[in-house]
């Protein structure tokens, strides 16, 4: 069975993706708090990806997967002058540096094997202005730029790259926000998992690179 490695797999979008793939893949999930997940057919590994030393140590013991899904996320929302420097650092390390570091670790092995699929879970904020989320949006814009460049760099090697950008999704990502989301007017994590399933079902010579997933209506709650 092909192997899928999913970061951010203990909650929200990452967990929904892991649950979706367990019947077709041997799934390893990485998350900060693995105690939150039980009863799933997922091999869980604990790691705070904002700790680069801990991340590097973890990666040494993980075989190169067939599918690498980078769904980890940290977000603090509000006027930028009210965001702490430590919160900015956490977002940069989690949302930008860790996906780049993880990709760097596995990429050469995938290229030598001439197969593999790297899926970045980004955000619509990567391509828009983001009042009350300036730092988070900047991190996601960085991942979008990285993924676009990576696709062009390796597209002839047999390794696929996909960027999936959801709009507001009902997860714990907004626990540190100065607003809430209306569950009935935003995406569910399963909607994003649908997009992952869609791209993984494509034949080996087809790469669906850029997907934006949006609800027909959208609302935040002040």
Image: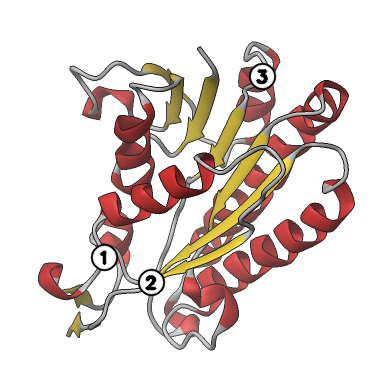
- Tag in front: 3 or 1: 1
On residue 167, which mark appears?
2
Q: Secondary structure at mark 1?
A: loop
Please give the name of the residue rendered at 58% of the width and 31% of the height, measured from the top-left corner.
67
In the depicted view, which residue is nearer to us: 101 or 189? 189
Query: In the image, residue 33 lies at what x, y percent?
Result: 33, 30
On residue 187, which mark appears?
1
Query: In the image, residue 185 lies at what x, y percent?
Result: 17, 75
Q: Residues within 10 Å of mark 1 (few under 14, many from 20)?
A: many
Task: Count every numbered label the image shows and give the total.
Answer: 3
Please give the name of the residue rendered at 61% of the width and 40% of the height, measured from the top-left corner.
203
Residue 202 position (above or below residue 65) = below
For disc 3, the marked residue is: 57
Q: Quadrant of the C terminus?
A: bottom left
Left or right of 54 on screen, residue 33: left
Closer to the chain start, of discs 3 and 1, is 3
């Amino acid at each position: 069975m092909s192997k899928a490695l999913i970061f951010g797999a203990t909650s929200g979008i990452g967990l929904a993706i892991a649950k979706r793939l367990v019947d077709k893949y041997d799934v390893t999930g990485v998350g900060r708090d693995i105690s939150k997940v039980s009863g799933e057919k997922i091999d869980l590994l604990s790691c705070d990806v904002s700790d680069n030393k801990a991340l590097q140590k973890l990666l040494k013991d993980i075989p190169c997967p067939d599918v690498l899904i980078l769904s980890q996320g940290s977000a603090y929302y509000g006027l930028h002058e009210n965001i702490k420097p430590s919160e900015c650092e956490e977002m940069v390390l989690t949302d930008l540096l860790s996906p780049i570091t993880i990709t760097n670790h596995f990429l050469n092995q995938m290229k030598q094997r001439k197969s593999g699929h790297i899926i970045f879970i980004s955000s619509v904020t990567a391509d828009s202005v983001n009042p009350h989320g300036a730092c988070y949006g900047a991190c996601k814009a960085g991942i979008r730029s990285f993924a676009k460049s990576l696709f062009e760099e390796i597209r002839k090697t047999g390794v696929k790259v996909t960027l999936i950008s959801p709009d507001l999704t009902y997860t714990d990502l907004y626990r540190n926000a100065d607003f809430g989301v209306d569950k009935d007017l935003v995406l569910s994590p399963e909607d994003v998992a649908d997009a992952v399933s869609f791209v993984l079902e494509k034949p080996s010579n087809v790469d669906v690179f850029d997907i934006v997933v949006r609800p027909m209506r959208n609302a935040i709650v002040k």
